[in-house]
Every structure is written in structure tokens, then in C-alpha cells.
Image (cartoon, grey):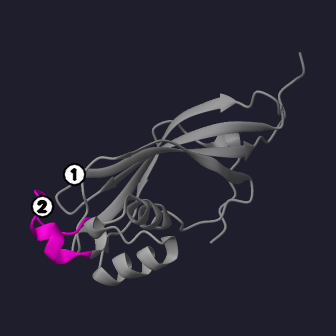
Amino acid sequence: MIVEQYFEDYEIGSSRESFGRTITETDFVVHAGHTGDFFPHHMDAHWCATQPIGQRIAHGTLVFSVGIGLTASTINPHAMSTGYDRLRFVRPVHIGDTIRTITRIAEKRDHPKRATHGVVVETVDIRNQRDETVLACEHLYLVTRRMPLAAG
């Protein structure tokens, strides 16, 4: 679905929440194949059982990619992702955990070089089925203004 939203339309504090998605062993295997990360923390159930964590943990990049993917429900032709800041893996995610993503518009600021655009910062809070944050970051968007800033 296309939802057109200009810089001026974003409201500080507005939020949205995704549906949940359960992380599976297939997710672990496919992600390891895509990334080449076959560390035993993710792939060796027997070894993990001998460690304090007790079971396999999801790749942080798997949790990030699935969690962000859960937010991809609309297309805004006036906004472009420019990246993510302050990415933290807060708690482990295991096979069978269900994650969901809550986002909130935290900041809007002028773009330092483009009068035709602004920067929108969205906090991303990925939570498990116990409502515990497992990953947190900030998502930065470059967003077109309806009216460019006056020069000067």
C-alpha cells in the first residue's frame, strides 16, 4: 500500500506496532546460509546445552532483519531510509520466541545540506512474547518537504 507522507506530516510521538512472528529453526539455518555465520552459538544445540545460555541463540542480524521486515507494510514515495544508528542486541532470542516491533517517531530535524528535505528519526523496539526488548535502534529517514526551507 502506498501512503504519501511529507516531512511536515510526521508527528513526534506517533507510533505503530507490528504483528508477531515466531522465530524458527529454519530461520536460523537459512540466515546462517545467507551470511556464512555458522558459529556454534546459533547452530550447535549440543554445544549450547553445555554453555550458560543453555540453548541456541538467534543471530542478531536475523532478529534485526525480521524485526525491521515486520514494519515494512507501506511505501512512502517521499521517504528513503538512510540507515540505522545505536543498534543494540539487548536480550537473546531463541527458537520458538515470537517477536514484534514497535516504532515511534522520536525526532525531526532539518537536513544540513538539503532545504528540500528533512530527517525523521524513528525509534525501533523489537520485543519478545514476554514484552521484553530484545533489540533496539534508531531508524533514519530522508523525507521530502512539501515546501523547501527558505534560504538564508
Question: CB under 8 Å between callouts 1 and 2?
Answer: no
Viewer-proximal residue, 81 or 9? Answer: 81
Classed neighbour count for the residue bearing mark 2: other residues with Cα under 10 Å, few (<14), some (14–19), many (≥20) = few
**Label 1 element class:** loop
Q: Residue at x 30, y 74 (%)?
A: 23
Classed neighbour count for the residue bearing mark 1: other residues with Cα under 10 Å, few (<14), some (14–19), many (≥20) = few
Q: Which comes sooner in the sequence, label 1 or label 2?
A: 2
Picture quarter containing residue 49? Answer: bottom left
Q: Residue at x 70, y 52 (%)?
A: 79
What is the spatial separation of the Cα atoms under label 1 and label 2, in whole angstroms?
Answer: 22 Å
Point out the image quarter for the C terminus.
Answer: top right
Q: Which residue lies under the disc numbered 2?
A: 51
Picture quarter containing residue 72? Answer: bottom right
Q: Residue 75, how many percent across, how many down?
A: 65, 65
Q: Which residues are magenta?
A: 44-57
Viewer-proximal residue, 121 or 149? Answer: 121
| Amino acid type for the residue under numbered disc 1 | Glu
Point out the image quarter for the N terminus.
Answer: bottom right
Q: Residue at x 43, y 81 (%)?
A: 30
**Label 2 element class:** loop
Residue 112 belongs to the span the image colors magenta = no
- Residue 67's label in the rendered image is none
Q: Residue at x 50, y 70 (%)?
A: 35
Work out which residue is located at the far top of the displayed protein and give it.
152
> Quick check: 103 left or right of 94?
right
> Quick check: 125 left or right of 72?
left
Q: Residue 88, how many percent across, how many down?
A: 38, 44
| Amino acid type for the residue under numbered disc 2 | Gln
- Compared with residue 13, is residue 131 higher up or lower down, i.e. above or below? below
Q: Which residue lies under the disc numbered 1?
A: 132
